Structure formats: C-alpha cells, structure tokens
Amino acid sequence: MLQAIGGIGAAFGLASSAGLNAYIPLLMVALAARFPLDDPFLALSTPYDLVGSWWAIGLLVVLLLVEMTVDKIPAVDTINDIIQTFIRPTAGAILFAANANVITDIHPAIAIVAGILLAGSVHTAKGVLRPAVTATTAGTGNWFISLVEDIIAFFVSLLSLLLPIFAAVFIIIGLALLARAYRRRKQKRQLMFE
C-alpha cells in the first residue's frame, strides 16, 4: 500500500515538474533507472525502460542544455514555450504513466491523461505568468525566473524520486498557492476596471 501511494506521489511530482522543464525530470528518471549499475534505483517497466537507455540519456542531456539556454533569452523563450506546449505535457504523460505503474488498477490511458493534465496545467500557469515578468522587467528578469523554474523542477523531481509522498503534498500546496495568486490578480484587475 505504501509503495502504491509512493508511486502515485512520484507520478504527481514528476509530471508536475515536467510542466516547468520537460527534460529535468526525464533525465533524472533516466539516470535513476540506470544507476547504480549493479542495482538501479528505479525499475521502469516496458516500454518506459527505454528512457534509461544510453542513447536516451545522451539525447536528454543535449535537449536539456538547449532548453536551459533558450529559455533564458527574451523573445526566444516565448518561441520555446510555444514549442514546449506539446513537449511538456507529453513528458508529463510519460512520467506519470511510468511511475504510476505500481498500481495495476489504473488504466494506462487514465495515467497518461493525468500526466498531460498535470504538466499542461503547470505549463499553462508558467505561460500566463511569464509575459507579466517580461512586461514588468522589460525582459531582464526572464533569465532569473527561468533559473528559478529549473531549480524548482530539479528539487521537485529529486523529492519525487526520494520522498514521493512529500512531493505530492508539495505539489498540492504549490498548485493551491498558484490558484490563490491567480484569483488575487484577477480581483485586482477587476477593481482597476470598476
């Protein structure tokens, strides 16, 4: 039972962090599925075990370096976010399905949809908030916000792998705070136009 809850917690955390940066959680899962060599930390079932192959790890490293570079450049980050609109939810679906497989009662389609919704929601929130940062800082704050997003994605992914139940709680609190900030912003905007 505890393993099942941990698997769901890991699935929620990894899929959510994919909404910020698709390649950080994918690379961390790939490395956990590969190392240590004699007894890997994470056992992925077929077909998700392909994520842990050497060619996938190499590809994820290259994609992560590209993502981390272009996401810190004003205007280019907007184009990157448009491209990532398809990649981040897909990564979230893969991560959720790969880590929720400890529960046999969940149909893979439900796991995939849950991953798409989680990563897509985080990506949408990022897409809504990033233009506000660009407008208020004339683009000079984008690199800092991008760096903070990468750090959050890293630690949420790490927490999801090591302490998955805490990761789920962290994600729920984070989503509640985002919803609260969105409601406040919406109320301020309504007050301005009244």
Image (spheres, helix red, strand yellow):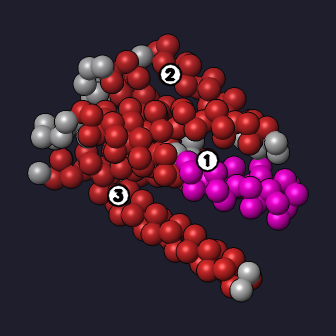
Q: What's the distance in space between the residues labelled 3 and 1, CA to CA?
A: 18 Å
Residue type of the residue flagged with mark 1: Asp
Residue type of the residue flagged with mark 2: Ile
Within 10 Å of the Cα at label 2, are there few (<14), some (14-19), or many (20+) other Cα atoms? Answer: many
The label number, if any, that marks residue 150 in the structure image: 1
Q: From this viewpoint, is residue 178 visible?
A: yes
| Picture residue at 38% right of the left edge, 32% below the top | 94
Instruction: Judge whether 54 appears above or below 152 on screen.
Output: above
Q: Is residue 81 left or right of residue 31?
A: right
> To which residue does mark 3 refer?
168
Q: Is residue 189 left or right of residue 19?
A: right
Within 10 Å of the Cα at label 1, are there few (<14), some (14-19), or many (20+) other Cα atoms? Answer: many
The label number, if any, that marks residue 57 in the structure image: 2
Q: Earlier in the sequence, mark 2 or mark 1?
A: 2
Farthest residue in the front direction? Answer: 194
Instruction: Judge whether 181 appears above or below 64 on screen.
Output: below
Quadrant of the frame with the C terminus: bottom right
The label number, if any, that marks residue 87 in the structure image: none
The magenta-colored residue range is 123-148
Where in the figure is residue 156, as x and y percent of width and height?
A: 47, 52
Q: Nearer the viewer, mark 2 or mark 3?
A: 3
Q: Is residue 38 left or right of residue 177?
A: left
